[in-house]
Amino acid sequence: MANYLSFNPSNALGILHQYLRSDGSFPVEEVYSFETKRHQVDLDDAHGTPIRHTWKNLMTIGKAKEGLYADVQEQLRYVQERISFRYLRFHGIFDDDMMVYGEDPAGNPQFNFRYVDQWFDFLLSIGLKPFVELGFMPSDLASDKSKTVFYNPSYTSPPKSLDKWCEWVDGFLRHCINRYGIKEVENWKFEFWNEPEVYVFWSGTEAEYREFYRCTYETIKGISTRLQVGASAGTIPQLTSVASRDVFFSFCRNHQCLPDFIPVHFYPHDPGEARTEQEWIDLLPLQFDPNLIKEFIPISSDPDFLKRILAEEKEGLSAQNLSHLDLYLTEWNATACHRELTNDTLQAC
């Protein structure tokens, strides 16, 4: 699918039309006979490897607030009744839409857990444990309110006060423990931030991110050392340098804040397959928006791209003596681009 842009959409209807019947009749072919074959397997003499349905550990939705919509909850309930996943991961538990944090005129923090409780109550009622992405920044805590992402804005700047941020995280976790019990919350996962290596999700520096992570980690572990915190030098492996990885884990060792698990996001974009604008012009018989092409990161032509990326991630963890940590694939899709032309095709489903 690497050259899908060479397809001319103006010809699409003509191609489809040849398969349509003009008389409006669509007879259903009957099956007159079928053949059944039976095989007997001696399991006592079989040598194999047990199937581990690791894919059932985690599913995801968009934002926490969307999880309060009736149609989303109906779909989640339907999936759980038929498949039964273990965790659900989502963005924006601290977004303004969740109304979790505010400050009075004197600047004193004010907490509100109404929507958080409704969301977590529902998840637990259908047998799902929260896989909590700690973010984004409540606007009243943001150091720069101009730094946002998404149509319904999520704030991506560092906190204006690390002390107030840690006070908020402490209050959030203690409320969850008071409501659901320490044993329950210790079985949840807390993924720290979302893709800090991507500028649209983190407007601060790498050094600010590391300190931000350290103080959050210490706050969480100060409540219970069994609470599980996940973080990575770079959540999207192909966008992270070895140097950044080494610096991050060295920092964690020096400050006793090594994560309990490693979250990984996968989209099959390969910067190594990028083309120049002239190469796109030569490739495409159509007119196109040059600005869109500049933003486009090519889809890898390697069918084993995910397998290779995960193997490289494991090798990197092994080099850091962290191979014992679990990897969680907490985001994935056929593309990360909203305007990707294959989004509405069967290939992406």
Image (cartoon, grey):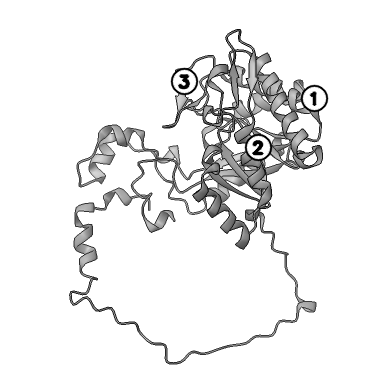
Query: Residue 263 at what x, y percent from top left?
Result: 63, 39
Q: Which residue is mark 1?
A: 222
Q: CA distance from mark 1 to mark 3?
A: 30 Å
**Left/right of residue 44 with respect to residue 233 in the rendered view:** right
Q: CA distance from mark 2 to mark 3?
A: 28 Å
Residue name at image x 72 percent, y 41 percent: 188
List the single residue furthest toward the top.
106
Q: In this orientation, which residue lies closer to the viewer: 182 or 88? A: 182
Q: Is the residue marked by circle 1 packed among few (<14), some (14-19), or many (20+) residues within 10 Å? A: few
Q: Is residue 125 above or below residue 37?
A: above
| Badge nearest the viewer, 2 or 3 | 2
Query: Residue 24 at what x, y percent from top left?
Result: 22, 75
Q: Which residue is mark 3?
A: 147
Residue name at image x 61 percent, y 62 percent: 82
Q: Which mark is residue 79?
A: none
Looking at the image, is mark 2 or mark 3 earlier in the sequence? 2
Query: Can see residue 11?
Result: yes
Q: Which residue is mark 2?
A: 117
Dot 3 amino acid type: Lys
**Left/right of residue 280 with respect to residue 266 in the rendered view:** left
Q: CA distance from mark 1 to mark 2?
A: 23 Å
Q: Quadrant of residue 172?
A: top right
Dot 2 falls on a residue whose secondary structure is helix
Looking at the image, is mark 1 or mark 2 earlier in the sequence? 2
Dot 1 falls on a residue whose secondary structure is helix
Q: Is residue 88 above or below residue 317?
A: below
Q: Is the residue marked by circle 2 packed among few (<14), some (14-19), or many (20+) residues within 10 Å? A: some
Query: Residue 80 at what x, y percent from top left?
Result: 62, 57
